[in-house]
Amino acid sequence: MTAESDHLIFPFGSKIIGARFYSARQPPAAGEFASPRDSQGHGTHTASTVAGGLAPAASLYGFGNGTARGGVPSARIAVYKICLPEPIGCLASSILAAFDDAIADGVDIISLSAGASFATDYFQDPIAIGAFHAMKNGILTSNAGGNAGPDRGTMGNVSPWSLSVAASTIDRRFVTQVQLGNNVSYQGVSINTFDMNGTMFPLVYAGYVPNTNLNFTGLESRLCLNNSLDPRLVKGKIVLCAKGDREAPLQAGAVGSVMPGFQDVAGLFPIPASQLPVQDIGQVLTYINRNSNATATIRRSTEATDKLPSMVALFSSRGPNTITPNILKPDIAAPGVDILAAWSPVSPITELPADPRFSYYNIISGTSMACPHATGAAAYVKSFHPTWSPSAIKSSLMTTASPMSSEVTPDAELAYGAGQLNPVKAVNPGLIYDAEPVDYVKFLCGQGYSTRVLRLITGDRSACSQAINQTVFELNYPSFALSVSGSSSNASRTYKRVVTNVGVANSSYKAIVSATPGLKIHVAPGVLSFNSLGEKKSFTLSIQGAMAGNISSASLTWDDGEHRLYIVYMGDRPKADVPPSALHRSLLHRATGSLRLAADSLVYSYHRSFNGFAAKLTESQKDRLAGYKDVVSVFPSRMKKLHTTRSWDFLGFPQNVTRATVESDIIIGMLDTGVWPESQSFNDSGYGPPPKKWKGTCQSSSNFTCNNKIIGARYYHTEANFTTKDFSSPRDSEGHGTHTASTAAGSIVTPASVLGIASGTARGGVPSARIAVYKICWSAGCSDADILAAFDDAIADGVDIISLSVGGFSAVDYFEDSIAIGAFHSMKNGILTSNSAGNAGPAPKTVSNCSPWSLSVAASTTDRKFATNVKLGNGKVIKGSSLNTFEPGQKMYPIIYGRDAPNKTSGGDASRYCYPGSLDKDLVQGKIVYCDDASGSVEGQIEAGAIGSVIQSSSPYAEMESPFPLPVSLLGAATGAELLEYLNSTSYPTAVISKTSEYVDSSSSPHVVFFSSRGPNPITSDILKPDLTAPGLNILAAWSEGTTLSGQTGDKRIVPYNIISGTSMSCPHVSGAAAYVKSFHPTWSPAAIKSALMTTARSLSVKDNADAEFAYGSGQIDPARAADPGLVYDARESDYVKLLCGQGYTTKQLRLVTGDQIACSTKTNGTVWDLNYPSFALSSSTSGNSVTQVFHRTVTNVGKPVCSYRATVNAPSGLKVQVVPDALNFKSVGEKQEFVVTVTAALGNSTISGSLTWSTSDGGHMVRSPIVAFVRD
């Protein structure tokens, strides 16, 4: 390679091994170099992003300080200078000349961050032509997608043989504060390297200072157009612009500028500047209008960590592909926002001649910055697989990309393609979708290109014919796209694909399909088996069904099962001196036959509190391990799900309730999504050091620190593959864990509210208790392997109570359930586990956490209600529901029925439901839109520009007050009909949605919420589940500031407290209550604490709860009473072992589980009815029969030393209960008394329930247990 230069020396070396330049004009213009030297900075930036060497302490005037490096720092760079300063830009002739040279010079990858403003025919586009010939010569071209977003159909580089890259955000943002003379500050974005040192400057609105000498009006000057501002009125002042412009304020002599702008990108300006949200611009203008001497100052920018998930930047061009709509573009997303990289020191950092600032590094944004990230990743893959074709490399990048969320990027795959670049995974993709030049020729034949044209392009004797022509659906592309005409929402297509095995020679892959409702996707064959590397297998994929909205997304994953994660449970901790981890590796060595494979496959070794491990195994290895004598069970690590203040007062448990002095020694282990440690709910003011029993640690990564409230924190992630939304630390990015932790043990915070709603004091059940955080749940769910690792640590760390608002999709065998296993060993170590029952109600047998040694909690209502009223133009007020934090900006707004505003270009039949793309923006913009029962998302309304929405909802979820990114009220069928009647009665309907108000409904009785999972117990039917209920509807508690209020697209509200619902919320209420009991009775067993909570619970009414005890168990918790229950039904490990013997578990299994020499026999086997449980359940498999069961129970006196109790039975017709003896007399605390209960039930088709209550004569203690008889399925 050679360099062509003029008198200016351009040095070569071992890094930049070649350079050429292509100039359209001679001599060069001022400031240009007639050489490959960069006068603009753009090329230097992209080249260093791809392959720059390590440069420590790189920054832009102190911003972004750190080590700068490229994706492949050791790679070589060949430079082809094709772009000149505007207005020339990058000429087609230069682009093709550079491609011609680069291909011949021997480059491996081509990176091109340039493109047209719109896509053109492939062979009228110099980039597509060059990329085709590069592909033909084994070179992948990586292209910038374009910066014309967020409009759709704006991708400039769309050829199927190149890689089209979108731009996504990173976790860094730059904040620039504007402070007004009235001391009000607004936060915007920019990279402001200047420092005004707090000096206040006059502030003027650009619309008031037009340059009349040049005939500009205020309508033009407000936009800060070039030369539109009057220097006499602007010089020395800060100017407020209605549109962003970097030069006009500088031209007029302004000392600073403020303007609206995208909040996801920080721009550079030649003077101090900040881009504010649009709504804040209005506030600043109001200040100017009200103050004749308005002043302001612009602070130097500060660098912050952006805790929101990565999203595609608004400027990034979107699909669909306008040339071939059925090829998905872009292909992939990569970081392209606020990227620090090398810069040309002869170019000002803003590229504006008047800017005096120069730097060797700069921070800029664009798909130009995303493209070299993908190029570097492609080069990284190429270094491992030098013989792979361009299509193979492209496939590996696409099929291993990390999924991105359509919640934060509504255009979904049209914005980010296959997802976020993941270079490390791309090196080992397992399978690739390969394509050779001939495949693209067949595709082009099918697209209508003639034989003559294609022979010229390929240089061979290609001939298009019906026999070889391929449709776009047969091109072996790593993604699948189908465009449907605007008049149809039905999808129907079959695709043909071939994959090549590049992973393990002998391997088998199973097709896993994920699709939105309405789409049916069939893959044939569903399993691909390979015997060698390089082997190819073909398959077809068929799509049928109706699209939901204007985009329907789905995915196909080929899973080799080779690395499926399994839990190998081995019971109690081994007594031998052999370290458990060595034992685990030895077992894996036996199973895999390889020390290396054994070491590579081991994910977790559980050894601190029980014995077992998590490992990635094949099916045969799993079966081999299951046969070993030391193994109790082997089961796949499944993903479990989250079971997503005044509530304590509602329970009769006020802050001033009697509290134990040792409450601050109680430690609650929260197994959840982590915690937001800066929340005031976790303030440690007044706390001493952690209790001496504490043996845990704090993993203080990612700026996470513990204190004397949060005394420990750990996180677990088996895959170590964090999405852009996740924090690789115990920090909470979901909000769920912060909410549950503060509900159980949050400190007292006054005032707390959701933007003014539900204002009051927020506190946990035990505000003085300590919290230990175990982050097991991520955006993808909660892995069994992580759950067991957290239990292993929490038990050994010394927690007193474990709170776990997580569960499976259905109940499974106790020793194939990570939560039941962990809870068993917790119980064995004196720790009660409080579990959420699940959110799969009201269907029967849906309770997912049902082990007898844990506490299963249902969710019930409180007396706090919320109303979001809709006032109509005729003065009528309609009551609705939601959590609407928005104050109305005016008295009335136009309102329109979605049915009357169809987007006719995409089919109007869905507009009544307000689906995305279904509404006509011209008719909806600025109005409230009324929608029929919708999906719960308001994406369609936001997309159409609505300022609010009223939704007629028949869903029972209306009972839950949900937030939305715009004002929303949910109406019932009757009130929805009222609104519709009004809409039809006038030509100009108007309405306004009020901010949500709160009220107390003292007349309503608590009832179990519809979503709360119901019994009977699906594993052991005659143990009643759930055990009890607690508040779980519309609960106010602390929230993570790493997510938004609603979590929906378009929501920018970051709040410290939030109101949400679920058994996830009821569980920590019971965890707090259990901790409260534990603080008074630190030596009580888990079963004793559980008994105290159950037998003192308040019975709920069957009238309000049709499922009775299968909905609420023993009733609603009463924490204050639970501290003094009088009697407890205690149980120890040996009692549960007897039950398990009776349930069919073997002596071998139970010896491993317990770690002792127990033996199951007819003499020791216990029945379920003899387990000392605080409730009674019996069932029959047939209806119409009478069933009798005898229960043996023992109660322990924990009240007064000398006391007597008498049995009271409440039994309806059909239920007969006999208690022997019916009186119990105690002489000391700790004394035990036995009794027998015989229950006879005449079972029809319904459940019969009653109760047994042991009461003292003075009424001081009432120990109540439910009795339930039913016909089981």
Image (spheres, rainbow, N blue to C red):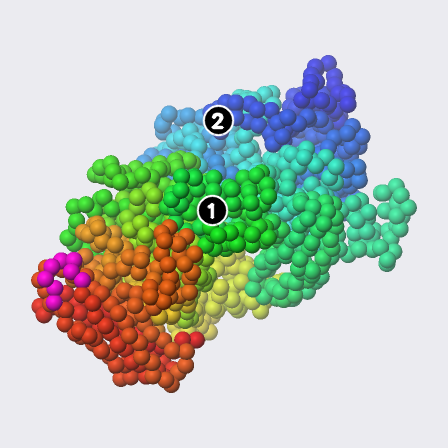
The answer to whether one can see residue 510 in this image is: yes
User: What residue is shown at x 68% (from left), y 33% (from top)?
Assistant: 383
Q: Main secondary structure of the magenta part?
A: loop
Task: Check residue 65 in the rendering and tell me which mark sits there, or answer none.
Answer: 2
Neighbour class for label 1 at 10 Å: few (<14), some, many (≥20)? many
CB atoms at circles 2 and 1 under 8 Å apart? no
User: What residue is shown at x 42% (from left), y 49% (from top)?
Assistant: 788
User: What residue is shown at x 40% (from left), y 42% (from top)?
Assistant: 576
Left or right of residue 681, residue 432 in this image:
right
Left or right of residue 583, residue 34 in this image:
right
At numbered mark 2, what does the secondary structure look like: helix, strand or loop? strand
**In what quadrant of the picture does the C terminus appear?**
bottom left
User: What residue is shown at x 28% (from left), y 72% (from top)?
Assistant: 1191
Report the residue marked by disc 1.
613
What is the x, y in percent for residue 18?
Answer: 73, 23
Residue type of the residue flagged with mark 1: Phe
What is the x, y in percent for residue 1112?
Answer: 31, 68
What is the x, y in percent for residue 332?
Answer: 62, 44
Q: Quadrant of residue 364 in the image?
A: top right
Residue type of the residue flagged with mark 2: Asn
What is the x, y in percent for residue 382?
Answer: 69, 35
**In what quadrant of the picture does the N terminus appear?**
top right
Q: Is residue 1226 magenta?
A: yes
Q: Nearer the viewer, residue 166 or 1080?
A: 1080
Q: Which residues are magenta?
A: 1225-1232
Task: Check residue 736 in the rendering and tell me which mark sits there, or answer none.
Answer: none
Q: Quadrant of residue 1250 in the image?
A: bottom left
- Measured in 3D between alpha carbons, the distance from the residue under mark 2 to the one under mark 1, in whole angstroms, is 41 Å
* 456, above or below 79, in the image: below
> Given the current orientation, which residue lies at the most extreme bottom position?
1184
Q: Is residue 520 magenta?
A: no
